Image (tube, coloured by chain):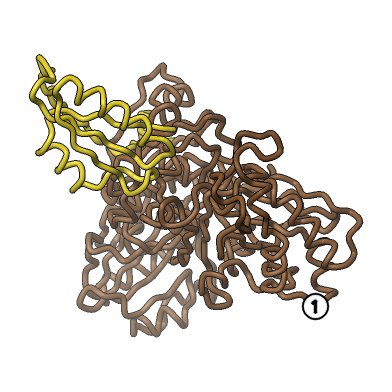
Chain colours: A brown, B yellow
Amino acid sequence: MSVEPSATAPSLPSGLVAFVKRECPTCTLVAPVLARLAREAELTVFSQDDPSFPPGTRIVDDESLEYSWHHGIETVPTLLRIRDGRIVGRAVGWHRGDWEALTGVGGLGPELPEWRPGCGSLSVDPDRQAELLVRFSGSRLHARRVELAELEDEHEAMFARGWSDGLPLVAPTEDRVLRMLEGTTRRPDSVVAVVPPDLIECSVEKVAINAVMAGCKPEYLPVVLAAVEAACTDQFNMHGVLATTMPVGPVIVVNGPIRRAIGMNPGMNVFGQGNRANLTIGRALQLVVRNVGGGRPGEVDRATHGNPGKIAFCFAEDEEGSPWTPLSADFGAAPGTNTVVLFTGEGPRAIVDQLSRDPESLSRSLSASLRTLHHAKLVMAFDCLLAIGPEHARVFRQAGWSKEKVVARLHELLQISGSELVRGAGGIAEGIPAHLAGSTLPKFRPGGLRLVHCGGAAGQFSMMIGGWVSGASGSEPVMKEIRP
Amino acid sequence: MSTNGTSRRILLDPTSERRPAMRARVARLPSLRGKTVGLLDISKPRGDVFLDRLETLLHAHGVATLRFCKPTFTKPAPVDLRHEIATRCDAVIEALAD
């Protein structure tokens, strides 16, 4: 664990400083050397487990491990030279040459072996990490402390307080939240975004608390932070996405090297269960909206049906297997940039075509299904995120079709005669106003159809994810760079 | 789960910790006669049909009306619009949903 340089770290005295513990055989071995240094040089010993050890030296009791923790001691014995409060020399374990060079005292411990490794410092004892982290860094946290009663079941307590999306939560203890915060360089009290619908300034710490509850690892936190930033923009319009009766929620697409670094799934069962990063990042965003923003079903969230993706809908694009540039490039991201793109979407629907082997047939096939998105007689109202599966992408790759060409062809095929769309046409009341009967209308607005490449290697399927009210009057897709 | 070396179990509050301000409701109008009623269209289809009919009924009862419109139904009404309605009207009727 890295210990950040702390302004509150207790300062070390000038001269030589040693960190020891009695239960370490090497420390016991060098006790006579330390006694000699105490006589011949300016030495202060910080003892981790016995304030009377080593005899014959000036000892500071560090059983609290405050000094050891704050100065990042990992091994005992560690011998330091301190000048003006700063560490200017260090020897770890026992090595006669190193100790003589550091102390300027010759002939140290002639009866000792030349070299002995040290032992682990009690300040890095895994069994004590949680306790020490809270004791020495807990003051970084500002959230209200909620103490559970002795007989209160932890899981039931979190449900009872309304923090859950319906699934069990990981308890956001101080040590877990502090470890989560190590996933970012941002200060815990810095504001990430103003979260709808209650328009609450949300700190990095509050995001971290919800990320813990969602089950995230610390390395996921930068992705969650970027997703929260994107969701809380005016363009994305999280308030409207919540309030609508339509079954939509934020869909998070992750691009860039971080996908692989944190183990996201862009492949088989990409929208399904089984990958911790995909699911917990998506869930963390929704928990922030729920708990910080106050966006709860039945309150501001008025969805008629909702969809299972409103628990968590986050995935990575398969960039390596894609014939095309990543989705993030559509929004201007440079290659290799870590980004999230947030799209307001319903649950994914399959487009099955196991026979098309040429791009024209496949384009017609895709457009036939795309035409039905939300309703076969409604046009220009809703965007679509079209997830092209690898076996469909291969057809376009082999024909040399660029992403732009595929999108352009789909738009051509989705020009629909108004006479088929007007209210009453086909014996269906739903449709567009009668005066548009003579026009030809596109299913999607320009830019309203976006392609992303993902899914398993076998299966000639793609998936379409229908949007919500598109454009400035509804929700625009939003890209944010993922920053550490 | 240990906290400060004891068996106390302490969780961090994931919520906004907000305490909503409580405000008293404005007293109900004893009568609409001579009052001004705002009619707010949220820009959903056929909201105008509903409000046109209400406006006719209100005028028949000697009630003045003012028409307002949200730029889009997908977002909360802008602060300026809310302020204008509050300062110019005695009551408001909002045509929600289609």
Q: Which of A59 and A313 is in front in this view?
A: A313
Image coordinates of residue A140 in percent, x first then y, are: 28, 51
Q: Dividing the picture into quarters, in which one does residue A355 lie?
A: bottom right
Image coordinates of residue A176 in percent, x first then y, are: 44, 44
Q: Residue at x 21, y 32 (%)?
A: B19
Q: Residue furthest top?
A: B30
Q: Residue at x 35, y 62 (%)?
A: A186
Q: Is mark 1 on a helix, strand or loop?
A: loop
Q: Dividing the picture into quarters, in which one does residue A360 lie?
A: bottom right
Chain containing the residue with disc 1: A
Q: Residues within 10 Å of mark 1 (few under 14, many from 20)?
A: few
Q: Quarter of the image containing the C terminus of chain A?
A: bottom left
Q: Name the residue under label 1.
A: A400
Image coordinates of residue B5 in percent, x first then y, are: 36, 36
Q: Left or right: where does residue A213 sit relative to residue B12?
A: right
Q: Which of A54 and A153 is in front in this view?
A: A153
Q: In this view, does A97 lie above or below A481?
A: below
Q: In this view, does A287 lie above or below B50?
A: below
Marks counted in the figure total: 1
Q: Left or right: where does residue A452 sit relative to residue B55?
A: right
Q: Nearer the viewer, residue B53 or A162?
A: B53
Image coordinates of residue A270 in percent, x first then y, are: 70, 51
Label 1 amino acid?
Gly
Q: Dividing the picture into quarters, in which one does residue A72 lie?
A: bottom left
Q: Which residue is drawn at 29% across and 31% down?
A: B94
Q: Which residue is drawn at 49% across and 76% down?
A: A95
Q: In this view, does A3 lie above or below A473?
A: below
Asked whether residue A172 is in view, the answer is no
